[in-house]
Amino acid sequence: MDCSVTNVLPKPKTIAVNGRVIPREAIAREVQNHPAEKPILAWQAAARALVVRELLLQESTRLDIQAEPLSDPEGRSETAEEAAMRVLIEREVVTPQPDEAACIRFYEQNRQRFRAGDLYEAAHILIAAPSADIAARASARTTADTILSAVRADPPLFAEFARSHSDCRTSAQEGGRLGQLTRGQTVAEFETALQRMRPGEFAVTETRYGFHVVRLDQHAPGQLLPFELARDRIADYLATSVQHRALAQYVSVLAGRAEIVGVTLAAAGSSLVQ
């Protein structure tokens, strides 16, 4: 973030935790880690994050926590303060691991998350028309309906109409064929139309681009990932969710015991665990 952001911010109040002031310079450096629509919102988020950090550091000092900094495979090491906060959280924020029953329950309640996307093979003829041009849209609809009637009566005509009438020049050269499509590869309106069709069916659908005469050739429903293959992913997700909630609660307890000046920590927990 541009460091000039601080020049357009109103001068904030002094921010302190139990009498220890958090310097404005530290907040300005932290702002880059909290993108927001307005500079003042980024500043407030940065201030909350540093207040949470200060709460944890003060608590680790009070408990006389001694911690050895760890290094990652790239050789980067924790600072002494980061190590102290990590050990504090490991010691004070104990969360249970999700059991098999919890994992199964989550799987059953969220089956769509573990289902591969449907696969469609389709073709179309686009009669383009600007969305704001009512007359052009009406004319495009009439043309699309006429083509639809013709290809329903004589399906082999579809490729010929695509080459001669479609405004989608890429697919027109292929007789209108779009190949295999999965979720998100077409605009939402077109995708919804495919979901409603049966293989071999023709239909007209409207999108922001105009009217499409659509032919659905094949539909392969997505397969549900078996629970056995999803179990570890579910367990990790549930464990992380529980840990985030427990951490937010722990921060709230520390904040309740502290004297915090200049900022409210209503969102302190979420700032910490993002």
Image (spheres, rainbow, N blue to C red):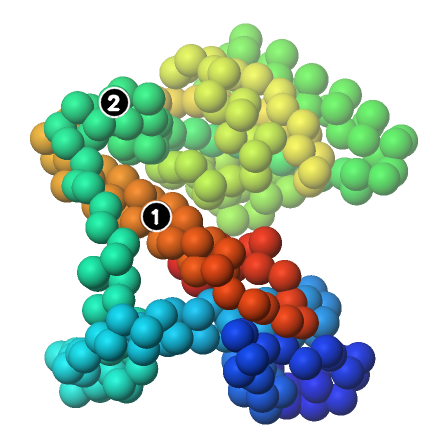
Q: Give left or right: position of 39 versus 49.
A: right
Q: Give left or right: position of 154 versus 110.
A: right
Q: Which residue is located at x 39 percent, y 75 percent? A: 58
State which quarter of the image contains the C terminus.
bottom left
Identify the disc placed on residue 218.
none
Give 93 or 207, whichever is nearer the viewer: 93
Is disc 2 surrounded by few (<14), some (14 to 19) or many (20+) residues within 10 Å? few
Whether residue 69 is situated above or below residue 46 in the rendered picture: below
Q: Which residue is located at x 63 percent, y 61 percent? A: 264
Q: Position of residue 62 (x, y in %)?
A: 32, 74
Whether residue 200 is situated above or below residue 247 in the rendered picture: above
Q: Kindly tell me whether residue 33 is visible in this rendering.
A: no
Q: Identify residue for label 1.
A: 246
Q: Give left or right: position of 100 versus 144.
A: left
Whether residue 97 is situated above or below residue 71 in the rendered picture: above
Q: Position of residue 259 (x, y in %)?
A: 56, 68
Give 241 or 54, whichever is nearer the viewer: 54
Please tell me whether mark 1 sits on a helix, a strand or a loop.
helix
Give 84 or 232, whichever is nearer the viewer: 84
Please tell me whether mark 2 sits on a helix, a strand or a loop.
helix
Residue type, label 2: Arg
Identify the disc placed on residue 105.
2
Q: Which residue is located at x 26 percent, y 67 percent? A: 88
Quarter of the view holding residue 151? top right
Give 5 or 79, whichever is nearer the viewer: 79
Quarter of the view holding residue 24? bottom right
Q: Nearer the viewer, mark 2 or mark 1?
A: 1
Q: Kindly tell me whether residue 216 is visible in this rendering.
A: yes
Q: Which residue is located at x 70 percent, y 86 percent? A: 6
